[in-house]
Amino acid sequence: MATFSYMPYWVYEYTTDHNVLISTFESGREQRRYKGVRPRKWKLVFRQIPSTINNIVSFFNDRKGAYEEFTWTPPGATSSIRARFESNSLKVTHYGKAYAECELTIQEVIE
């Protein structure tokens, strides 16, 4: 399994979410059922020289977007997780020849 090892720009967003089914009755009472944890997600920004961004795009294309999973170590973590890209598309912005930028979301794979 391939490993995604590129370091994001220092700004990133992290999301954790729980799946709770809430049923509201006519009386106003609620019934809640816990359905489990949803995959964690990290929204990452990469601002690097164009050749590094091109390598990220190649890695993305080699995984066929969100199709194939890979290993990745989240920011601040000490061990890797199984992950995949959340989206099938990747947008890259070039700022002249000096640097380029892309933004992507990595999602944890839960068995």
Image (spheres, rainbow, N blue to C red):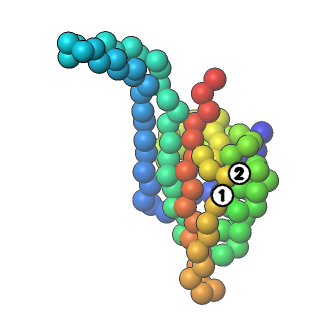
SS label for mark 2 = loop
Find residue 41 and report its horizontal and vertical position in percent. Answer: 50, 42
Rendered view: 71 above or below 22: below
State which quadrant residue 108 falls in.
top right
Q: Which mark is residue 65?
A: 2
Can see residue 73?
A: no
Can see residue 32?
A: yes
Numbered circles on residues, count: 2
Given residues 51 and 42, the one toward you in this image is 42
Find residue 65 and report its horizontal and vertical position in percent. Answer: 71, 51
Find residue 62 and report its horizontal and vertical position in percent. Answer: 79, 53
Marks 2 and 1 in Cβ contact (< 8 Å): yes
State which quadrant residue 22 falls in.
top left
Rendered view: 86 above or below 16: below
Question: Quick one: quadrant of the N terminus?
Answer: top right
Q: Amino acid at mark 2?
A: Gly
| Residue at the spot 29% in from the left edge and 18% down from the top edge | 24
Given residues 9 and 76, the one toward you in this image is 9
Give the class, few, some or many, for how many residues have Cα within 10 Å of label 1's Cα (few <14, many ≥20): few
| Residue at the spot 56% in from the left edge and 70% down from the top edge | 101
Question: Quick one: quadrant of the C terminus?
Answer: top right
Q: Amino acid at mark 1?
A: Ser
Q: Earlier in the sequence, mark 2 or mark 1?
A: 2
SS label for mark 1 = loop
Given residues 72 and 25, the one toward you in this image is 25
Per the image, the residue denoted by label 1 is 89
| Residue at the spot 28% in from the left edge and 14% down from the top edge | 25
